[in-house]
Amino acid sequence: MTTEAYVFDAVRTPRGKGKKDGALHEVKPVDLVVNLMHALQARNPGLDTAQIDDVVLGIVSPVGDQGAVLPKTAAMKAKWATEVSGVQINRFCASGLEAVNLAAQKVASGWEDLVVAGGVESMSRVPMGSDGGAWAMDPQTNLQTDFITQGIGADLIATIEGFSRDTVDEFAYNSQQKAARAKADGSFSKSIVPVRDMNGIVILAEDEYNRADTTKEGLGKLQPSFLMMGQMGFDGVALQKYHMVEAINHVHTPGNSSGIVDGSSLVLIGSKEAGAKNGLKPRGRILATAITSTDATIMLTGPAPAANKALKKAGLTYKDIDLFEVNEAFASVVLRFMKDTGVPAEKINVNGGSIALGHPLGATGGMILGTVLDELERRGLKRGLCTLCVGAGMGIATIIERV
Amino acid sequence: MTDHIRYEKDSDNIVVLTMDMVGQSANTMNLNYQQAMDSCLDRLEKEEKLAGVVITSAKKTFFAGGDLNDLIKASPEVAEDFMNGTLLVKKQLRRIEKLKAPVVAAINGAALGGGYEICMAANHRIAINDPKTKIGLPEVTLGLLPGAGGVVRLTRKLGLEAAAPFLMEGKQVNPEEAKAARLIEDLATDQADLIAKAKAWCKANPNAVQPWDDSSYKVPGGTPASPGLAMKLPIIPAMLKGKTKGRFPAPEAILSAAVESLQVDFDTAMKVEARYFTSLAIGPVAKNMIKAFFFQLQEISKGGSRPKGFAPHTTKKVGILGAGMMGAGIAYSSAMSGIEVVLKDISQEAADKGKAYSENLLKKRVSKGAMTQEKADKILSLIKPTANADDLAGCDLVIEAVFEKRELKAQVTKEAEAKMLATGVFASNTSSLPITGLAEASVRPANFVGLHFFSPVDKMPLVEIICGKQTSQETLAKALDYVLQIKKTPIVVNDARGFFTTRVIGTYVNEGLGMLQEGIAAASIEMGAAKAGFPVGTLAISDELNLQTMRNIRLAAEADLAAQGIKLPEAGADHVIVKMLELKRAGKAAGAGFYDYPQGGKKTLWPGLKETFGAGTKEIPFDDIQERFLFVQALETVRCFEEGVITSVADANIGSIMGIGYPAWTGGVVQYINQYGLRKFVARAQELANRYGERFNPPALLVEKAEKDEIFE
């Protein structure tokens, strides 16, 4: 590697409930980003935006409010320098972390020096699936690729691995407990930037999706989310491939799956020189990135292979990693990751995850990178690994080392 | 040139086109039609004051559709020519709907396939309200799609969801139902009314335009861009795959073409449809299905296996011995065709119960409006339940459907033969006992034949006719005539243990049970069968048949063969059955078999299979599971040909699909070999033999044909 890619700062909005009654529903996606852009400038007074080569943002449904290269639009609206460019990328749930990785690769290649990565998703305004696409919507493609929705894959993982409803609910309960503690003790405060309106009035200051009062009994009462669509047809498609399974056990509910939320994240990544020029202090270093893919039908088993790939690239093993952020798209995804890798629960998602906090698709990767960096600093630990399962079987990982 | 279509203009400048193709009993979409219609269109386009066009037929049917003799010749090598030909047909229909005057389809008989596609190119459709007239697009049942614009027009006309049953299932309806479904717009009482209404509509709608040529038209239910449809769209293919298991390309192509057609303009949509149509026409499955369900079924229903030289025979009075499920079903099917039935059992009560079976079925038909009470009463009155053998007097056919016990069958044979007409035919509905042996009890073995019905008789179309050693040709002819008389499909086989169907399906069942013994996961065995296209998996079918029954058949066969000094080899399946019986899991009737049958719940595989047989401890390629099921039956069929048990390819194909659930996409158990390619099939069979046992070794007849590059014909 010619140049090291450093992380200078990471900010995020609080996650707002991704519904009409969510606090961020009234906020345009572009403003979620502009807010954070202003925060980056405020937190880093030496930052000369003219030095920023590019703004790379993950947006999973880049249409309507989120269409037309929102990152460049946001840069213009934030009054950043004319030279700043922008690009929107989509790798489903990995979009945010892909933006981080791409930014790191740009810097590492030496061809760009300072890049803002992250993502945005207003799921309340631009619902999942708004961008259509051949995979789901074109019958020929759908048939030829055995399309099913992620939830069926999550339930298939649970069925194959024998994760019972109690097990996944227990996992969800723990996520809520950890998130509640983290919120209470200020673990998120370093990165969270309250969302303000045009008058500076705070619209949302803290994550609002999590439920500290969640009980195991309450979780146990929720109806399975994917039973009906499974029985309508998706189970059959999965079972025609996973023929050794007689029937899918639908264990995932809204309580043990990631929450639908609105939010945005930005991560400032650059070379040591670019940092020095802008008065930025390196907080972390990207050691390795990885992208891979597994079977698209079970869909959500990508994290372990992606983590393996990144570790190999970095010349590290699981023992060398102090903290893991494994996106809680569904409880079974993280449980399967633990089973695949042997990583103990106490190293994973120590401040809770998407089940408690929500998963603002395009923004999540940038958010969890910030979360793990904050926690490494707080605990005085060295390395963290972020990974997400991704639609169509993909998996992504990033290893960061505190400096 | 216009001989095939008469062109008559009236004083109001309305032209009636009467399709009456010379030398054909029905109008079809062949070259003659195309040329005749082209010249009609040339004339119509030149008419200065054209006020309307009415298209009707001089035949019994309106129009019969495409010519399958041409279609079956399509191959990948001529794909482009084929598609261009398709585009020409579409272009002609487009000319019809672009005429500067209203066009009305005056439907005076069946309008199926291409026939209804012509109707859709008209601005308005009126049909004579004859409930026997069928309207629809049955192409999918032959592995095709309506390629003359049918997918595009019906989807635009009705919307994707409403069009689906007609396009993807080939649903056919009568004129009243067609009107309710918006397939047609109006009904007429007779030909005069039809033409009058058609002309009146032309006068009332001088500026008629097709909806798809009207820019303000909105497709019912919306396009893929409409939120309502968009929400459902991702799961529709999954629902379809649940039915097709990926084995039937036609419904998949239809769904794809229909959705894609809504994404683009009408003329582009036509091109999209043509490409999908071409892909089906040049592919193997349409050929398999056209061969089986059109040509071979036609051959059979024309009496292809009937010996020549005997006058057609009409059965007038049939005696049925044994009023159980089978006997009662045969009685129903016979009475439905107007045959007088004597339904005999050992007690009046048992016989009455058998008649009640028909009563129930008829009641359902009446309540559904499919039959009048009067007709139902008449049919029911044809069945005489009795315990008295004297009532068999005058029967020209007696069918015994008693338990599969030799002594019992011998006894009822003697009893009936003493009472029935001496010239009559005596038939046994045995599913496994050799006919020649049963005929030993007969005083007239030349009149003795096997008529193997399938359960439930009222739903299953197949009857396997078994000729014993002494069965005369005349008896065979009469038996075949009877089967056709009751509107079932006869196949003819020679006598041997299990005949054709039972023997072949036996290999299927054994293969599945053997896999269990090998350690393959039970769910994989069942899904392997489903994915290959079988309607019921081998473990489920065994539970239905009952393992004790299967064991009894096996023991009977063992005993029979032992008497001849032959030892029946033990297979994996036998161990499995014995073990299951030890565990008191005999099947569905016992409430426990390979499946558990929870009260009121869905059956689930018995978890104990893992412990008992190690099921799930071994993995083999999923393709192997599927092909073992397909191959083992195909290979047994070849052996049946070698031994002379079956002689007709059509009978083998149709028998396998209609009798024992061999997948329809294959075109039948012999066509499966043909379409696989014999050399490839032999090589794969040898591979399977090396992996799974010598039953997969290709028989000499197969190897010989492969080496000569022949197929089974």
Image (tube, coloured by chain):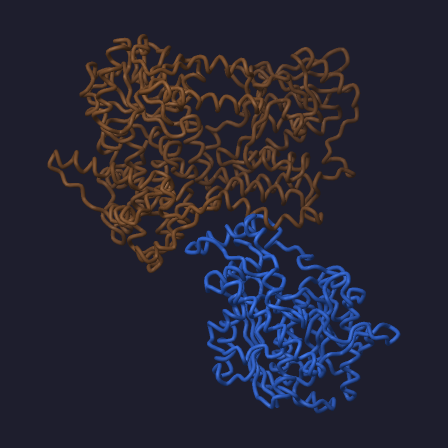
Residue B241 image position (x, y, % from top left) = 51, 46
Q: Quadrant of residue B10?
A: top right
Residue located at (24% from left, 23% from top) = B409
Residue at the outermost left position: B565
Which residue is more in the foreground, B524 or B260? B524
Q: Is residue A274 above or below residue B701?
A: below
Residue A228 image position (x, y, % from top left) = 58, 51
Q: Could you tell me which quadrant the N terminus of chain B lies in?
A: top right
Q: Is A377 left or right of A293, judged from the image as shown?
A: right
Q: Quadrant of residue B197?
A: top right
Is residue A114 visible in this depiction of the protein? no
Q: Is residue B670 above or below residue B685?
A: above
Residue located at (12% from left, 34% from top) = B563
Residue B357 image position (x, y, % from top left) = 44, 24
Q: Is residue B707 above or below residue B137?
A: below
Residue A86 image position (x, y, % from top left) = 72, 72
Query: Which colour is chain A painted?
Result: blue
Q: Quadrant of residue A381?
A: bottom right
Residue located at (31% from left, 45% from top) = B681
Q: How many marks?
A: 0
Q: Could you tell me which quadrant the C terminus of chain B lies in?
A: top left
Residue at the outermost right position: A199
Is residue A317 visible in this depiction of the protein? yes
Query: Which colour is chain B painted?
Result: brown
Q: Is residue B213 above or below residue A15?
A: above
Q: Is A325 left or right of A64, judged from the image as shown?
A: left
Which residue is more in the foreground, A150 or B272? A150
Q: Is B328 left or right of A300, judged from the image as shown?
A: left
